[in-house]
């Protein structure tokens, strides 16, 4: 049943509502095919859904907030541990004709921009040319990683949440555009090639503050990428490459530019304006590369991924990420262990600010992750999944995370920037539990 939420031919993925005009145009283009279809457009719809009800110790520490990803509001999840992992999704699909179908998906969850339109993760029409070629137009999931096409479906994986070091910094879940796929093989093995182009948008919460320039709208346009998936028996390999460009500046950098352009700042610290420009995102280009595998021999489950992120902007998430996950099923129980790591060794390449309180505070903001997004940490997770009933599972997971110097890119803090400037490495631990189901 979890296959309903995995990207396979003639099956579902993820998309959005702002594409209604585009979809209407596409439906008009294929009206000739639709006219010959026997079922009415209002009949024979297929509906499926999924949900997660969970609680996490998000407020365990006064100086570190546990978050699932950077699109969540820091103070909201700190005040309510039920919001970290809980979500509800509904998926609808319909075969329009022998070659055309429609897929839509809506997911309600905690995030900065939780409007109705932004909750629609999928809304695309698909044309299946033959057994090998398929084409999609609309809003689709950004499936550039192993779990990207179903990471909202908690029932489809073993963790309470995917490793934060690898997935927590990813701001984009979908894009609006076009995708072509080619697949060949049989039930024993197959290869899928795909390529996409489009644009996206998301809102992220930088740091701890609630509102203002802590909420930033990030718009990648254009986005383009390609990927390959190979499956044979119990082994699956996936590789992806993607590039995109940020079309607009984020609010936090605009505020920074306005601050450093003040005559007093320029006179006391001329390099401040150069630093602010290096943090700019408008026109910045990003490159994502990832390689993942899944091996399921008998009762064993082994999977892992490694990725590299490069950007022309200093003010973003960069470096390498990886994780390795292993579990063994004993009847309905699946205990598992995961090691995940984020390497982000970028160093602040500028001269220190003059020793004045105002300039030291500004430099502290630049050096720590409020803007730089440094994620340098590792986590060891222990968990267990219990499939106690059909299409229902309970999960318990505890994480022990080591945060290196000034690394709080995913886990925000209410501490002042001056305190953070010389904060040593530290260890934090959290536990969480979820009830996951599909229907």
Image: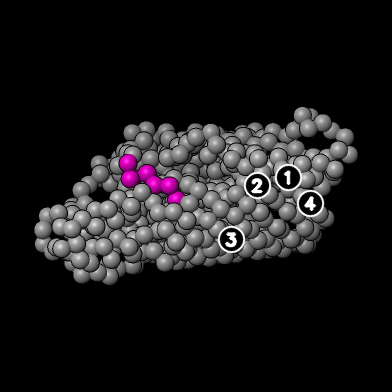
Split into 4 quadrants, where in the image is the C terminus?
A: top right
From the top left corner, tell me how far across and down residue 416 is, in percent. Answer: 20, 48
Mark toward the start of the polypeptide (1 vs 3): 1
Query: Real-space Cα distance between discs 3 and 4?
Result: 22 Å
What residue would you read off at disc 2?
138
Mark toward the start of the polypeptide (3 vs 2): 2
Query: Real-space Cα distance between discs 4 and 2?
Result: 15 Å
Query: Does residue 392 belong to the magenta stretch?
Result: no
Mark 1 or 3: in front is 1
- Return the residue nearer the eye: 40 or 439: 40
- Return the residue nearer the eye: 165 or 22: 22
At numbered mark 3, what does the secondary structure look like: helix, strand or loop? strand
- The answer to whether one can see residue 80 in this image is yes
Query: Real-space Cα distance between discs 1 and 3?
Result: 21 Å
Determine whether 42 is above or below 185 in the image: above
Q: Which residues are magenta?
A: 212-218
Residue 186 picture quarter: bottom right
Determine whether 227 is above or below 99 in the image: below
What residue would you read off at disc 3?
224
Query: Real-space Cα distance between discs 2 and 1?
Result: 9 Å
Residue at 77% x, 58% y: name it: 133
At numbered mark 2, what does the secondary structure look like: helix, strand or loop? strand
Query: Does residue 213 belong to the magenta stretch?
Result: yes
At numbered mark 1, what does the secondary structure look like: helix, strand or loop? helix
Q: Is residue 424 left or right of residue 237?
A: left
What residue would you read off at disc 4?
128
Q: Are marks 2 and 1 in contact (CB under 8 Å)?
A: yes
Please state the total of marks drawn on the protein image: 4
What residue would you read off at disc 1?
26
Mark toward the start of the polypeptide (4 vs 2): 4
Q: Is residue 77 left or right of residue 40?
A: left
């Amino acid at each position: 049943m979890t296959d309903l939420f995995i990207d396979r031919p003639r099956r579902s993925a993820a998309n959005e509502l702002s594409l209604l005009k585009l979809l209407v145009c596409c439906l008009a283009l294929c009206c000739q095919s639709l006219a010959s279809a026997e079922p009415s457009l209002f009949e024979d719809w297929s509906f499926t859904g999924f949900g997660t009800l969970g609680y996490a110790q998000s407020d365990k520490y006064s100086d570190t907030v546990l978050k699932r990803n950077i699109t969540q509001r820091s103070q909201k999840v700190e005040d309510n541990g039920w919001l970290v992992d809980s979500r509800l999704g509904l998926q609808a699909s319909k075969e329009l004709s022998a070659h055309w179908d429609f897929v839509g998906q809506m997911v309600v969850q905690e995030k900065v921009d939780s409007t109705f339109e932004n909750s629609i993760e999928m809304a695309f029409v698909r044309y299946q040319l033959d057994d090998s070629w398929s084409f999609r137009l609309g809003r689709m999931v950004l499936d550039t990683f192993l779990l990207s096409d179903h990471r909202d479906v908690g029932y489809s994986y073993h963790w309470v949440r995917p490793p934060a070091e690898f997935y927590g910094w990813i701001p984009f879940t979908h894009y609006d555009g076009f995708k072509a796929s080619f697949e060949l093989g049989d039930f024993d093995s197959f290869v899928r090639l795909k390529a996409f182009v489009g644009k996206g948008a998301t809102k992220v919460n930088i740091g701890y503050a609630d509102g203002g320039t802590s909420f930033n709208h990030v718009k990648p346009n254009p986005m383009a990428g390609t990927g390959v998936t190979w499956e044979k028996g119990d082994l699956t390999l996936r590789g992806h490459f993607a590039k995109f460009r940020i079309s607009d500046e984020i609010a936090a950098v605009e505020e920074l530019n306005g601050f450093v352009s003040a005559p007093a700042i320029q006179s006391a610290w001329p390099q401040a304006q150069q630093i602010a420009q290096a943090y700019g995102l408008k026109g910045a280009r990003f490159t994502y590369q990832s390689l993942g595998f899944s091996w399921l021999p008998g009762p064993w489950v082994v999977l892992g991924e490694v990725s590299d992120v490069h950007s022309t902007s200093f003010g973003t998430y960069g470096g390498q990420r990886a994780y390795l996950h292993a579990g063994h099923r004993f009847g309905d129980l699946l205990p598992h262990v995961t090691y995940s790591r984020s390497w982000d060794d970028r160093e602040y390449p500028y001269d220190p600010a003059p020793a004045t309180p105002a300039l030291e505070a500004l430099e502290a903001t630049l050096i720590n992750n409020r803007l730089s997004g440094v994620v340098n940490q590792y986590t060891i997770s222990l968990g267990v999944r219990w499939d106690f009933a059909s299409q229902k599972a309970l999960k318990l997971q505890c994480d022990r995370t080591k945060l290196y110097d000034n690394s709080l890119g995913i886990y925000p803090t209410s501490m002042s920037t001056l305190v953070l400037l010389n904060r040593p490495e530290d260890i934090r631990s959290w536990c969480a539990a979820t009830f996951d189901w599909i229907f």
